[in-house]
Image (cartoon, rainbow, N blue to C red):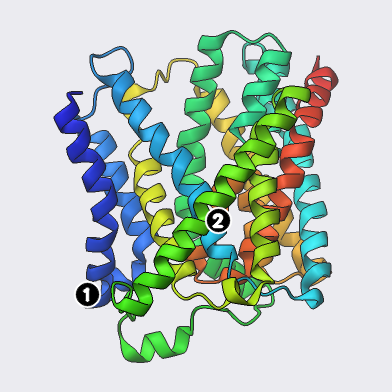
Amino acid sequence: MKVFLLVLLALFYCLAPAGVLWLCRKVRWIGKIGPILMLYFIGAILANIGIFPTPGEEGYESLASMQELFTNAMIPLAIPLMLFSFTYRKSETRDQLLAMITGLLAVIVAVVAGYPIFGHHIPNGPQVAGMYTACLTGGTVNMAAVSKMLDVDGQQYALLNTYDMIVSFTYLVFIMAIGTRLARKWLPVKTLDHYDEKAVREAGEEKNPYKGLFTGRGLSHALRLLGLTVVVVGLSAGIAIGISKLLPGTFMMFFILAITTISIALSFWKPVHKLEYGYDMGMYFIYIFSIVVASMANVRALDFSGALWIIGFLFFMEIVSLSLQLITAKIFKIDADTAVIASVTYINSPPFVPMIAASMRNSRVLMPGLSIGIIGYAAGNYLGVLMCQLFS
């Protein structure tokens, strides 16, 4: 794509959330859908109406680079802003620990149960199972690492990653559209931190959380928060780069771990904790992330020949792991939002946690989701190789 068109697209990514937020406040039925799901729909439409180049076409590489820049930048900027106002609750440690353990076991059981059905029909089945185990436990970074460890062809990895992106996109839409509501009917529900559902329903519209942001006090707080966020991200990147030189392939795990740890530590410092608008500024970065990620889900770019068994395997693993997560949550009386965020963390990786926490309108699950995700990053490579050996 030409530079001018890329600039226009970048501006659209940045401004579209503001338009959607305005519509959510003004149009009741759009407000019920919610900004994240609306942005996902808009992004998906953009990706599939034929205006974007597909792999191999002129301009695709520049488009993909720009989209990757957005996705890589938004989450590291959002996490500190959303955590600076975080309040730790010791009483919820039990649910978080149980959700982490049961979620990890749910993924393992789903892979082991699915492989005998689908794996024998997939070329290089054990390697595929190993990569997807790593991906569903940690994230794309684990899938890439395991593909290198198992000496998987780069073209096959790219195709498998695309299938995972499409299936995971479907899973996210399900969670945001009805999954969370179904879980809340099945499991206990705890008080939501940043959202009074009854009040919003009675008012008939969302309040504008950004009102006053550009006034003197609001702007002062915003600039201090952004400056502090840049420092946290820079410091975390430096720490992760240093560790990854000693432990190759661990940059993303330690990057997110450092951001989370430093941000939580700063949240206990009153001058930082009392700064206003941090959570909502972080939310805006999540909105941008949502539309960009959705606009990368280009179905036209997929080669579906021989892919039905792989896609079926992916759907099976995600459905079974989510079901097991909810069943064990019922047995151990884990609250609905913690159970769902644990499933999302494992299946979609930590960068999607703030987005789903936002769609839940519950910041309480942000910290548990990120913590569980870090464990998933650490375990993903080991489990991926283990599963490959098991099925070989």
Q: Amino acid at mark 1?
A: Val
Which residue is rendered at x = 70% and y = 47% of the image?
A: 257
Up-down relation of residue 198 to residue 375 (above or below) = below
Q: Position of residue 378 (x, y in %)?
A: 77, 38
SS of the residue at dot 1?
loop
Q: Can you identify the residue that label 2 sits on?
A: 79
Would you say the residues marked 1 and 2 are in contact, meaning their CB atoms lie under 8 Å apart? no
* Residue that mark 1 sits on: 27
- The quarter holding residue 9 reads top left
**Frontmost residue, 256 versus 105:** 256
Q: Amino acid at mark 2?
A: Ile
Would residue 105 be found to the left or right of residue 312 on screen?
Answer: right
User: What is the x, y in percent for residue 226?
Assistant: 45, 58
Query: How many neighbours does mark 2 have within 10 angstroms: few (below 14), some (14-19), or many (20 or more)?
Result: many
Q: Residue furthest left?
A: 4
Q: Residue at x 63, y 17 (%)?
A: 121
**Tag 2's secondary structure?**
helix
Residue 193: x and y in percent read 57, 79
